Amino acid sequence: MSSLSRDEVAHVAMLARIQLSDAELDKLAGQLDQIVGFVGQVNDIAADDIPPMSHPLPLTNVTRHDEVRPSLTQQEALSGAPASDLGRFEVPRILDED
Protein backbone atom coordinates (compact mmCIF):
# COMPACT_ATOMS: atom_id res chain seq x y z
CA MET A 1 0.00 0.00 0.00
CA SER A 2 1.45 3.37 -0.96
CA SER A 3 2.10 5.97 1.69
CA LEU A 4 0.25 9.26 1.73
CA SER A 5 2.37 12.26 0.91
CA ARG A 6 2.28 15.55 2.74
CA ASP A 7 0.93 17.19 -0.44
CA GLU A 8 -1.96 14.70 -0.60
CA VAL A 9 -2.87 15.46 3.01
CA ALA A 10 -2.68 19.18 2.27
CA HIS A 11 -4.98 18.69 -0.73
CA VAL A 12 -7.55 16.78 1.35
CA ALA A 13 -7.36 19.45 4.06
CA MET A 14 -7.96 22.14 1.44
CA LEU A 15 -11.00 20.25 0.10
CA ALA A 16 -12.36 19.99 3.65
CA ARG A 17 -11.53 23.67 4.19
CA ILE A 18 -9.29 22.86 7.15
CA GLN A 19 -6.28 25.08 7.69
CA LEU A 20 -3.29 23.11 8.94
CA SER A 21 0.20 24.25 9.87
CA ASP A 22 3.27 22.58 8.39
CA ALA A 23 3.82 20.63 11.61
CA GLU A 24 0.21 19.44 11.60
CA LEU A 25 0.50 18.33 7.97
CA ASP A 26 3.62 16.31 8.73
CA LYS A 27 2.01 14.68 11.76
CA LEU A 28 -1.31 13.93 9.99
CA ALA A 29 0.44 12.46 6.95
CA GLY A 30 1.90 9.71 9.12
CA GLN A 31 -1.30 9.14 11.08
CA LEU A 32 -3.51 8.97 7.98
CA ASP A 33 -1.04 6.63 6.31
CA GLN A 34 -1.38 4.27 9.31
CA ILE A 35 -5.18 4.43 9.12
CA VAL A 36 -5.14 3.58 5.41
CA GLY A 37 -2.80 0.67 6.19
CA PHE A 38 -5.15 -0.66 8.89
CA VAL A 39 -8.10 -0.49 6.49
CA GLY A 40 -6.04 -2.43 3.99
CA GLN A 41 -5.36 -5.11 6.61
CA VAL A 42 -9.10 -5.44 7.29
CA ASN A 43 -9.73 -5.84 3.57
CA ASP A 44 -7.13 -8.61 3.42
CA ILE A 45 -8.68 -10.45 6.37
CA ALA A 46 -12.30 -10.20 5.25
CA ALA A 47 -13.51 -13.55 3.98
CA ASP A 48 -15.94 -14.06 1.12
CA ASP A 49 -18.12 -16.36 3.23
CA ILE A 50 -18.83 -13.64 5.83
CA PRO A 51 -21.84 -11.53 4.83
CA PRO A 52 -21.56 -7.75 5.14
CA MET A 53 -23.43 -6.29 8.08
CA SER A 54 -24.44 -2.84 9.26
CA HIS A 55 -23.94 -3.55 12.95
CA PRO A 56 -21.82 -6.04 14.90
CA LEU A 57 -24.79 -7.14 17.02
CA PRO A 58 -27.98 -8.68 15.65
CA LEU A 59 -30.70 -6.05 15.80
CA THR A 60 -34.40 -6.31 15.11
CA ASN A 61 -36.75 -3.44 14.48
CA VAL A 62 -39.23 -3.28 17.35
CA THR A 63 -42.34 -1.62 16.00
CA ARG A 64 -46.01 -2.19 16.53
CA HIS A 65 -48.49 -2.94 13.79
CA ASP A 66 -50.25 0.09 12.35
CA GLU A 67 -53.82 -0.31 13.54
CA VAL A 68 -56.72 2.11 13.60
CA ARG A 69 -57.46 2.99 17.22
CA PRO A 70 -59.98 5.33 18.81
CA SER A 71 -58.80 8.94 18.84
CA LEU A 72 -60.10 12.44 19.38
CA THR A 73 -62.62 13.97 17.03
CA GLN A 74 -61.74 17.23 15.35
CA GLN A 75 -63.98 19.15 17.75
CA GLU A 76 -62.44 17.44 20.81
CA ALA A 77 -58.90 18.20 19.60
CA LEU A 78 -59.74 21.87 18.97
CA SER A 79 -61.70 22.31 22.21
CA GLY A 80 -58.59 23.32 24.18
CA ALA A 81 -57.06 25.48 21.44
CA PRO A 82 -56.86 29.21 22.15
CA ALA A 83 -57.87 29.90 18.53
CA SER A 84 -59.01 27.84 15.54
CA ASP A 85 -59.99 28.58 11.96
CA LEU A 86 -61.66 26.27 9.42
CA GLY A 87 -61.19 23.25 11.70
CA ARG A 88 -57.45 23.85 12.21
CA PHE A 89 -55.30 25.28 14.97
CA GLU A 90 -54.67 28.98 14.45
CA VAL A 91 -51.21 30.19 15.38
CA PRO A 92 -49.70 33.67 15.38
CA ARG A 93 -48.06 34.73 12.12
CA ILE A 94 -44.27 34.93 12.41
CA LEU A 95 -43.37 35.57 8.76
CA ASP A 96 -44.50 38.38 6.48
CA GLU A 97 -46.25 37.77 3.18
CA ASP A 98 -43.29 39.22 1.26
Image (spheres, rainbow, N blue to C red):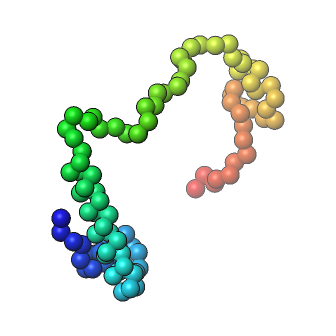
Which residue is drawn at the image coordinates 73% and 45% (left, top)? 92
Q: Position of residue 24 (x, y in %)?
A: 39, 81
Q: Nearer the viewer, residue 69 or 55?
A: 55
Q: Quadrant of residue 68?
A: top right
Question: From the viewer's perspective, is residue 1 above or below residue 73?
Answer: below
Measured along the vertical axis of the image, is residue 53 above or below residue 63?
A: below
- Residue 16 in picture, x, y percent from top left: 37, 69
Taking depth in this image into account, of 93 and 72 the one nearest to the observer is: 72
Task: Tell me if I can see residue 15 in this picture.
Answer: no
Image-based side of 57 in relation to 38, left or right = right
Decide if residue 58 is on the left or right side of residue 53: right
Q: Compared to 61, does 7 lie above or below?
A: below
Q: In which quarter of the view is residue 55 placed?
A: top left
Q: Is residue 42 above or below residue 51?
A: below
Name the spot of residue 35 as percent of width and height, x first.
32, 64
Residue sitting at the far front: 45
Which residue is found at the position 58% from the left and 56% from the top? Answer: 98
Residue at 63% of width from left, 54% of height from top?
96
Q: Is residue 61 visible?
A: yes
Residue at image x 31%, y 75%?
29
